[in-house]
Amino acid sequence: MKLSLLFVYGTLKRNQPNYRLLMDKESGETTFVSNARTVQKWPLIIASKYNIPYLLNKRGFGNQIFGELYYVNERKLNFLDEFEKCPQYYDRLQIPVYQMNENENTCNTTLNPWVYILSDFKESLLEHKMYESYDSRGSHGLRYVKREDQHENYSTICDVKYT
């Protein structure tokens, strides 16, 4: 069985609103590997009417991003592509990350997991506050609105991408 390494930085992380989707066995297999931090800086923002975390495809800008690494099987990766509307909304790219050890210190191990990233974004998004770590219940006060609570006829793509 082929496994892919995935870096998650937003609502799919542990203790976040969509973690249950990542771990749901009906949509595929998922195994936690470790915490991780991006090698390069990237802009991580919270935007749209529904306070969605976005990693913008602008390498070298923003912060090194803290997230989590998971092994996922092909079925789970296909499920997540559909959930993240990849490639219509997000792109799935490989970026280098440092694996973190149990003491939360960066290891020398560099891995190249897949990550969902927003390309072709509105330049005005670069004016948003940039974070190094995401928490839906963070002090920013911008709680994520779950998909089931979002208006079915409203697409957030118009908030963040050129259409």
Image (tube, rainbow, N blue to C red):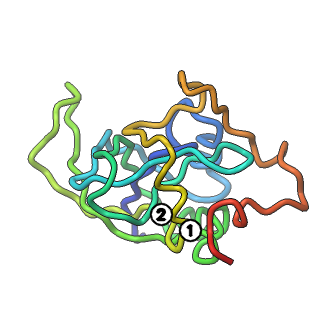
For this rendering, which residue is in front, 92 or 53? 53
**Residue for badge 2:** 117
Position of 70 relative to 80 (above/below): above
Q: Are marks 2 and 1 in contact (CB under 8 Å)?
A: yes
Marks 2/1: CA distance?
5 Å
For this rendering, which residue is in front, 22 or 153? 153
For the point 40% across and 52% down, which residue is it?
Answer: 43
Position of 146 relative to 73 (above/below): above
Q: Quarter holding the N terminus?
A: bottom left
Residue 35 found in image quarter: top left
Give the residue type at disc 2. Ile
Q: Secondary structure at mark 1?
A: loop
Which callout, 2 or 1, points at the residue further toward the start of the chain? 1
Point out which mark residue 90 bears.
Answer: 1
For the point 69% across and 60% down, which residue is it?
Answer: 159
Give the residue type at disc 1. Tyr
Is residue 65 found left or right of 115 in the rendered image? left
The x, y position of residue 120, in whole percent, is 53, 74
For the point 61% across and 48% down, which residue is it?
Answer: 47
The x, y position of residue 13, in whole percent, is 50, 40
Residue 94 found in image quarter: bottom left
Is residue 101 found left or right of 57 in the rendered image? left
Position of 98 relative to 94 (above/below): above
Is residue 79 found left or right of 91 in the rendered image? right
The x, y position of residue 121, in whole percent, is 54, 68
For this rendering, which residue is in front, 130 or 6? 130
